[in-house]
Image: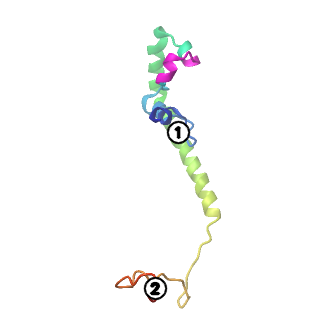
Amino acid sequence: MLWAHRTAPKDATNETPFSLVYGSDAVIPAEINVSTMCIASFNKSSNSEELCENLNLVEERREMAAIKEAINKRRIASYYNKRVHPLSFQLDDLVWRKNEASRAEDTGKLGPK
């Protein structure tokens, strides 16, 4: 389950947590036994060069993920704020108040309110 969490792209960033930390996509242990596109296209001679390229681009991927996350956060905040109705109270307004804090002892469910 932990591998699935680390290797699944997140909605906010469209990146996997593993790729944001290490700069390359992870290979699930189950993929090693089964022939997948990732395993079939593996070339040992060019692997180190590609890893260096990925490490050079990891900062850019992290910045893009942070930008996408900020855009998503702003969109969610605007969606929430459209539905919030601000209230302002004036002096002598009647408001509903829970009286639990002013009670010295709990009288139970049959006690006076």
Q: Which residue is mark 2?
A: 110
| Chain part drawn in magenta | 29-38
Q: Is 92 placed left or right of 99 in the picture?
A: right
Q: Is residue 41 something one can see in this rendering? A: no
In percent of width and height, residue 86 lies at 59, 73
Query: Closer to the camera, 84 or 70?
Result: 84
Determine crowd level at label 2: few under 14, some 14-19, many 20+ residues with C-alpha closer than 10 A.
few
In this rendering, the answer to whether 35 lies above or below 27 is above
Query: Closer to the camera, 86 or 5?
Result: 5
Q: Which residue is mark 1?
A: 65
**What residue sits 35% from the left and 84% below the top?**
105
Q: Secondary structure at mark 1?
A: helix
Q: Earlier in the sequence, mark 1 or mark 2?
A: 1
Instruction: Report how far apart the C-alphas of labels 1 and 2 lie in the structure.
Output: 56 Å
Q: Is residue 47 something one can see in this rendering? A: yes
- Rendering quarter of residue 55: top left
In percent of width and height, residue 52 lies at 44, 20
In percent of width and height, residue 94 lies at 56, 88
Q: Is residue 67 magenta?
A: no
Q: Secondary structure at mark 2?
A: loop
Tell me which amino acid carries mark 1: Ala
Residue at the farthest left position: 104
In this rendering, the answer to whether 63 lies above or below 44 is below
In percent of width and height, residue 109 lies at 45, 81
